[in-house]
Image (cartoon, helix red, strand yellow):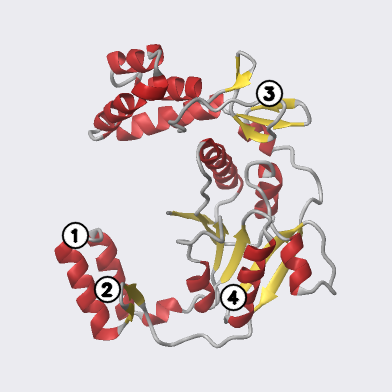
């Protein structure tokens, strides 16, 4: 939830997933109050009413989020999360051509034949080096990797379940052969995303990120050098397009093209795992997060062969 000063724009300046109109403006603060209030309503009436009635949300919101976090620390975490998310879905809207309504309703009406699918086949050789981690001094493998995991445990750097999973993976390097695996990466160009590692293990990566010629050229180049495959949505395509032309035509915006991306993924050959690495600054992050949640909800309703991952 956006927590800074109220973000307001003209009611016609946004498309796709948007904040609702409040007194003629798309303001984030009323949504913040409403969602925090509804998230805590069935757990703590006083906390819910305090958030609902807060007149100085811009300066006092931290206290309400701290209280919501405290309430979530017990057995009511699932209830609070479900009610808060339900509040967001009933509040946030999807706007297109002057009309707006619930996000999941809008997803059911995509524009037809919107994306063309293009796949890049890598020509690199899959490495048999096994699991490689990166410490602050560089790549770590073999016995050094186990020592690194021991240090992470001792210093509390990583969750014990994570280090144990890495030890198990290190014992089974054959698990890193992902040539029969498809992974959809939302926010594929994210700095902390797994695209490069997955491609290096031979994975088929379906990449979704904003149109950006430089980012897509980098992802295409990485795929060409890898043993994996990269599939992308493009707005125009022909068999004669160069990589430079593809990088200019590739990309999709989860905020404004949610219905079309959802339809494109509905038709994708499965099974696949969908990973969410989408990020945007400020209030746009709420819009992007709600778009992704609506997309995931719909995919899980339509398909039974989709797994989820997220950062």
SS category of the residue bearing label 2:
helix
Mark in the foreground, 3 or 2: 3
SS category of the residue bearing label 4:
helix
Residue drawn at (57%, 28%), measured in percent from left and top? 92
Identify the disc placed on residue 249: none
Judging by the rendered image, the residue that carries numbered circle 2 is: 167
Judging by the rendered image, the residue that carries numbered circle 3 is: 11
Mark in the foreground, 3 or 1: 3
First in residue order: circle 3 vs circle 1 = 3
Residue 13 placement: quadrant = top right
Mark in the foreground, 3 or 4: 3
Residue drawn at (43%, 20%), measured in percent from left and top? 33
Gap between marks 2 and 1 measured at Cα? 16 Å
**Circle 2/circle 4 CB separation < 8 Å:** no
Side (left or right) of 71 relative to 41: left
Judging by the rendered image, the residue that carries numbered circle 4 is: 222
- The 10 Å Cα crowd at callout 4, few under 14, some 14 to 19, many 20 or more, is many
> Would you place residue 191 above or below residue 11 in this image?
below
**Circle 3/circle 4 CB separation < 8 Å:** no
First in residue order: circle 3 vs circle 2 = 3
In front of the other: 2 or 161: 2
Side (left or right) of 102 relative to 74: right
Judging by the rendered image, the residue that carries numbered circle 1 is: 156
Quadrant including the N terminus: top left
In front of the other: 26 or 58: 58
* Residue 38 in view in this figure: no
């Amino acid at each position: 939830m956006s927590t800074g000063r109220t973000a307001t724009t003209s009611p016609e300046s946004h498309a796709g997933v948007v904040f609702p109109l409040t007194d003629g403006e798309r303001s984030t603060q009323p949504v913040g109050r409403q969602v925090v209030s509804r998230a805590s309503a069935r757990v703590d009436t006083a906390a819910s009413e305090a958030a609902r009635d807060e007149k100085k949300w811009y300066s006092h919101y931290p206290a309400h989020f701290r209280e919501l976090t405290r309430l979530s620390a017990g057995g009511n975490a699932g209830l609070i999360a479900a009610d808060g998310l339900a509040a967001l879905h009933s509040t946030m809207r999807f706007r297109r051509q002057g009309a707006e309504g619930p996000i999941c309703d809008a997803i059911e009406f995509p524009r037809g034949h919107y994306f063309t699918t293009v796949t890049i086949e890598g020509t690199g050789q899959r490495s048999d080096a096994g699991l490689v981690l990166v410490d602050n001094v560089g790549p770590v493998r073999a016995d050094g990797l186990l020592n690194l995991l021991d240090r992470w445990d001792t210093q509390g750097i990583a969750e014990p379940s994570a280090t144990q999973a890495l030890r198990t993976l290190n014992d089974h390097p054959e698990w890193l052969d992902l040539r029969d695996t498809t992974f959809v990466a939302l926010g594929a160009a994210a700095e902390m995303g797994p695209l490069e590692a997955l491609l290096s293990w031979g994975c088929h990566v379906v990449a979704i990120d904003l149109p950006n010629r430089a980012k897509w050229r980098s992802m295409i180049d990485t795929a060409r050098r890898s043993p994996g495959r990269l599939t992308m949505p493009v707005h125009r395509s022909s068999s004669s397009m160069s990589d430079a032309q593809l990088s200019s035509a590739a990309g999709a915006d989860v905020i404004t093209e949610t219905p079309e991306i959802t339809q494109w993924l509905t038709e994708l050959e499965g099974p696949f795992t969908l990973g969410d690495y989408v990020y945007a600054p400020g209030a746009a992050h709420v819009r992007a997060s709600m778009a992704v949640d609506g997309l995931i909800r719909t995919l899980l309703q339509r398909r039974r062969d989709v797994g989820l991952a997220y950062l």
